[in-house]
Amino acid sequence: MSMPEPNNSPAEQAHDWLPVATGQRTPNQATRTVRAVAWTGWHLGELSGVAVPLALAVTVWAWFAVLSALVALEWGVREYRLHRTDTDEQGAQS
């Protein structure tokens, strides 16, 4: 059995502009919320590596703040290097 041809009636064609005009996204475009949740999921280890020692520093022993700062510093350096290599690769493709 073959796929049926899409029905491109004049009524459907008239509404093709509607998602663009109203700011709605098509199904394959991620919203800011989806991107933020995906970022949080991918970076959960780094977030907990900073947040848990920081919480321990506030509640248990202040020197845990040093561990939190070291993890945050390492995370920032790695993100900087990743951004730099991505930028260099994009420049090489141009």
Image (cartoon, grey):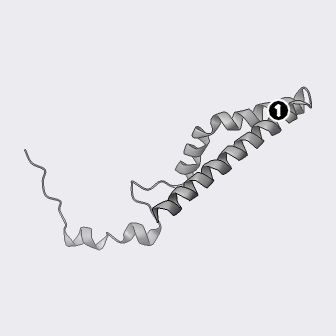
Which kind of residue does numbered mark 1 sit on?
A: Leu
Q: Position of residue 42 (x, y in %)?
A: 58, 39
Q: Nearer the viewer, residue 37 or 24?
A: 37
Residue 63 in the figure: left or right of residue 74: right
Q: Is residue 83 above or below residue 14?
A: above
Q: Position of residue 78 (x, y in %)?
A: 67, 44
Residue at x 45%, y 69% (from the top left corner): 22
Q: Position of residue 49 (x, y in %)?
A: 73, 33
Residue at x 86%, y 35% (from the top left corner): 65
Residue furthest to the top: 60
Residue at x 64%, y 36% (from the top left corner): 44
Residue 50 in the figure: left or right of residue 10: right
Q: Nearer the viewer, residue 47 or 70?
A: 70
Residue furthest to the right: 62
Residue at x 71%, y 33% (from the top left corner): 48
Q: Which residue is mark 1?
A: 67
Q: Quadrant of the N terminus?
A: top left
Residue 53 in the figure: left or right of residue 27: right
| SS for dot 1 | helix
